[in-house]
């Protein structure tokens, strides 16, 4: 976008980059807040239907579309209460830390090919690291509230989120190994084409890892059945007990924004990201090769696809919350350390061995022996040779072209194994 | 009793070395009413529990010394407010025992229908609230939806949804309206699939079993020593139901009915119905079994209601009229215990020749269940406290009176 501004408006470079950055931040803030608002509406409606009642039906027509807006306005107008025993500066800053951490994750989350605020080569790593900062907001909030119950909630949260970062990270590392890159845009592009290109169907190990990822994502965002820190029946609202009005809104927004982020990350890593099950954009010719605007349209379609997948993940989490009771804290930690971590470690080893010895994904290996195998070795070797940077659009374009079905059948590469250096 | 409970594998023990005194205060989303429980905890592990009651004390027994027995009936509704009809029944039967009054068969059959319908309603609240305390909100909504239908039936018959004052000493207030019995049966027919839904969401749910199996195990001797009754006693394996084993004036209400007492005698439940399987983690006397006993009792109550509807339709004669408002009581006393949904509810009335009793005493089951909490909760985690309290199914109205 900065290049656009420089080209068309001939503005100085620093100004163009600043404006581009601000626009990006604004767009992402809009998406983060919208995800919170839609998440709240989704929660109330889906929970109502599961519980055999209607849900919100008053504000904004028959389906209550404007209820989140009304809630936001109401909470803005509430009295700002800071408990007497609270540590004032920490109490005030804690929700903002929480929200900032989650918002930073949005900066690295790609919504379509190239549509990402920060195209980092270590995007996956950055995202995980930043999501872990959420802990500070929670622990500070619980401690500074000056109430034993809030402290309990904060302590439980600390234990839980820190424990679940381990298997969550291992699931992401698994995909990094299979794909050969930590660049989230690359990971998305490698899954272009039909749905069997998705890493979910790449090999049985990633398939199992997806379900472990889902469990860890639910746990690290404190959703039921792992919502002990906010256990309403026991601790009133856990670490959020003493927060009211707009301070509480920040916690609430960051929770739903985090749910969107982990759902989006799961969609990106396992379910193809912005690539649909059917490559409609490619079939309709909405690619950048035909025309830049058509490419932009194709990307828009991809972004819609991505958001739909993320919201499907959110709906699943809402469904899960209103179906299952919550686990006790020691059961939560047991699930993490005794079940999630060993399973995902085994899957990691399996996926590494698979990627090393077998070409391509399961479907490709079994059904299309002529297809271009996207094995990690073949991707890693040229990367190492070139210098470890996949920054040029040409390399990206080439990789994308190779994985498309039409090109695949006309590929000049022979594909029996990974000893294909003579054809490269 | 709890000394051999295995410590949880990883609990976040804080650096604190002293114990924390925590108040699960009177206002709390989880305790079933205004109960204050003071916990002494070491991190998450509870070492001692002291319940404090009295926040709902309304001098019910003293008020009984000022009103006639018929005037006092509304006060009994407010004891166990979730099963008002059973409270009314207990009071009415005690007065009838004192006066030596026997009601006709038709009235007895109607009383069975009403009492068992209210048993289902009360157990629905217990099941839903246990799910709620464990974090499962959906079964709570479903059980209350079914309870609404029962309360609608009660509203048709006596005009009230919670505080009925319907089963008067000597008879009932009014007979059921036209088609009421058919609506009862229609309710029972549509209720059966809902029980299966509740089994799927709660009884057989892996998370629910993990949270409640082997939690708060009450050995049968302790249960008897502390005076526990009802589902709590039966879940510990004691085969005791006062509808079968009580005084004749009460047990004759259930004469001629086919039903089973639900208790895991020798570890096995009665097999008159395809009940869900018992998980292997559950020990007899734990929270899961207390929950399971209530679910099975609902099925038994449904059978009782169906039989009672047939017997009521086939019975001859009229419904009894209640005793007069200022009926003089003899100078004697009578004590009678009935099987309320939560346990055995005992009423004692001592008359002195006038219409106003000299003394009335109410013995509630929840009082004993709350008193056994310190015994059960030694060494559990804080998160197990709502589970155990919910499985006891206490209601503060009858504890504090």
Image: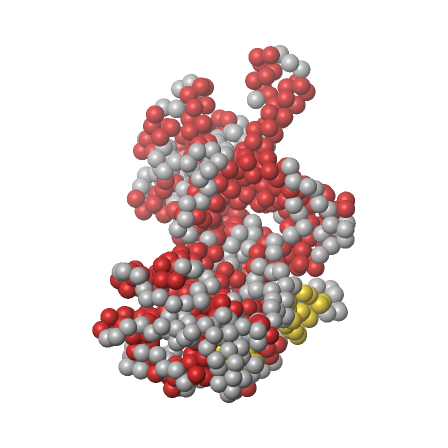
Residue with the most extreme left position = B314
**A139 or B115, which is in the foreground?**
B115
Q: Residue at x 59, y 54 (%)?
A: A230
Tell me where residue B397 appears, x and y as whole percent: 55, 68
Quadrant location of the N terminus of chain A? top right
State the count of labels: 0
Give residue A238's quadrant in the image.
Answer: bottom right
Tell me where residue A410 appears, x and y as whole percent: 32, 31
**B296 or A257, which is in the foreground?**
B296
- Coloring basis for residues: secondary structure
Left or right, B321 with reference to A381? left
Give residue A28's quadrant in the image.
Answer: top right
Give residue B113's quadrant in the image.
Answer: bottom left
**A5 or B203, which is in the foreground?**
B203
Tell me where residue B317 appears, x and y as whole percent: 26, 75
Q: Is residue B51 visible to us here?
A: yes
Classify A232 as above or below B333.
Answer: above
Q: Residue at x 36, y 47 (%)?
A: A362
Q: Residue at x 35, y 66 (%)?
A: B174
């Amino acid at each position: 976008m900065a290049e656009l501004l420089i080209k068309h408006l001939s503005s100085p470079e620093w100004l163009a980059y600043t404006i581009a950055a601000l626009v990006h931040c604004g767009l992402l803030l809009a998406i983060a807040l919208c995800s919170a608002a839609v998440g709240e509406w989704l929660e109330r409606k889906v929970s109502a239907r599961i519980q055999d009642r209607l849900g919100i039906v008053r504000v904004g027509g028959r389906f209550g579309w404007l209820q989140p807006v009304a809630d936001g306005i109401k909470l803005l107008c509430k009295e700002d209460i800071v408990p007497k025993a609270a540590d004032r500066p920490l109490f005030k800053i804690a929700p903002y830390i929480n929200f900032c951490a989650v918002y930073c994750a949005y900066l690295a989350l790609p919504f379509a090919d190239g549509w990402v605020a920060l195209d980092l080569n270590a995007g996956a790593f950055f995202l995980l690291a930043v999501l872990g900062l959420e802990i500070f907001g929670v622990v500070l909030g619980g401690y500074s509230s000056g109430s034993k119950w809030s402290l309990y909630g904060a302590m439980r949260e600390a234990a839980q989120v820190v424990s679940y970062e381990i298997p969550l990270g291992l699931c992401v590392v698994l995909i990094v190994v299979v794909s050969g890159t930590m660049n989230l845009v690359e990971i998305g592009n490698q899954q272009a084409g039909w749905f069997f290109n998705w890493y979910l169907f790449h090999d049985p190990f990633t398939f199992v890892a997806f379900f472990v990822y889902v469990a860890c994502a639910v746990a690290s965002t404190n959703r039921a059945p792992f919502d002990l820190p906010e256990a309403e029946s026991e601790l009133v609202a856990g670490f959020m007990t003493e927060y009211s009005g707009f301070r509480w809104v920040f916690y609430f927004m960051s929770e739903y924004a985090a749910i969107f982020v982990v759902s989006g990350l799961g969609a990106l890593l396992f379910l193809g990201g912005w690539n649909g099950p059917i490559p409609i954009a490619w079939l309709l010719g909405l690619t950048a090769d035909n025309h830049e605007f058509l490419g932009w349209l194709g990307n828009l379609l991809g972004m819609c696809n991505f958001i739909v997948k993320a919201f499907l993940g959110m709906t699943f989490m809402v469904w899960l919350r209103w179906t299952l009771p919550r686990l006790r804290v020691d059961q939560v930690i047991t699930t993490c350390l005794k079940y999630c971590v060993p399973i995902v470690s085994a899957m990691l080893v399996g996926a590494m061995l698979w990627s090393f010895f077998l070409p391509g994904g399961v479907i490709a290996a079994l059904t299309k022996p002529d297809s271009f195998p996207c094995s990690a070795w073949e991707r890693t070797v040229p990367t190492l040779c070139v210098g470890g940077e996949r920054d040029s659009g040409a390399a990206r374009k080439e990789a994308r072209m190779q994985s498309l079905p039409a090109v695949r059948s006309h590929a000049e590469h022979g594909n029996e194994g990974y000893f294909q250096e003579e054809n490269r | 009793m709890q000394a051999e409970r295995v410590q949880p594998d990883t609990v976040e023990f804080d650096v604190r070395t002293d114990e924390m005194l925590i108040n699960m205060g009177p206002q709390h989303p989880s305790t079933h009413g205004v109960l204050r429980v003071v916990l002494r905890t070491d991190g998450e592990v509870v070492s001692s529990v002291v319940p404090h009651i009295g926040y709902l004390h309304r001098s019910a027994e003293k008020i009984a010394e000022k009103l006639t027995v018929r005037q006092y009936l509304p006060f009994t509704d407010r004891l166990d407010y979730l099963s008002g009809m059973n409270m009314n029944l207990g009071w009415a039967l005690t007065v009838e025992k004192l006066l030596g009054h026997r009601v006709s068969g038709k009235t007895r059959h109607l009383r069975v229908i009403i009492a068992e319908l209210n048993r289902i309603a009360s157990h629905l609240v217990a099941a839903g609230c246990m799910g709620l305390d464990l974090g499962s909100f959906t079964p709570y909504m479903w059980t209350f939806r079914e309870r609404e239908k029962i309360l609608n039936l009660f509203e048709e018959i006596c005009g009230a949804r919670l505080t009925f004052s319907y089963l008067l000493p000597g008879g009932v207030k009014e007979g059921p309206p036209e088609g009421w019995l058919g609506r009862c049966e229609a309710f029972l027919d549509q209720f059966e699939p809902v029980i299966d839904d509740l089994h799927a969401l709660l009884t057989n749910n892996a998370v629910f079993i993990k949270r409640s199996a082997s939690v708060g195990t009450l050995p049968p001797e302790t249960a008897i020593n502390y005076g526990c009754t009802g589902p709590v006693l039966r879940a510990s394996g004691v085969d005791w139901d006062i509808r079968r084993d009580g005084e004749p004036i009460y047990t004759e209400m259930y004469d001629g009915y086919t039903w089973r007492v639900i208790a895991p005698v020798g570890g096995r439940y009665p097999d008159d119905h395809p009940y869900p399987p018992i998980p292997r983690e559950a020990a007899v006397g734990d929270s899961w079994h207390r929950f399971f006993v209530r679910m099975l009792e609902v099925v038994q109550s449904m059978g009782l209601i169906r039989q009672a509807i047939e017997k009521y339709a086939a019975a001859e004669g009229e419904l009894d009229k209640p005793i007069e408002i200022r009926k003089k009581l003899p100078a004697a006393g009578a004590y009678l215990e009935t099987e309320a949904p939560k346990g055995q509810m005992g009423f004692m009335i001592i008359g002195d020749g006038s219409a106003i009793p000299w003394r009335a005493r109410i013995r509630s089951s929840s009082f004993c269940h709350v008193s056994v909490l310190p015994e059960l909760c030694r060494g559990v985690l804080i998160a197990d406290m709502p589970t155990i309290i919910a499985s006891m199914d206490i209601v503060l109205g009858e504890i504090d009176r």
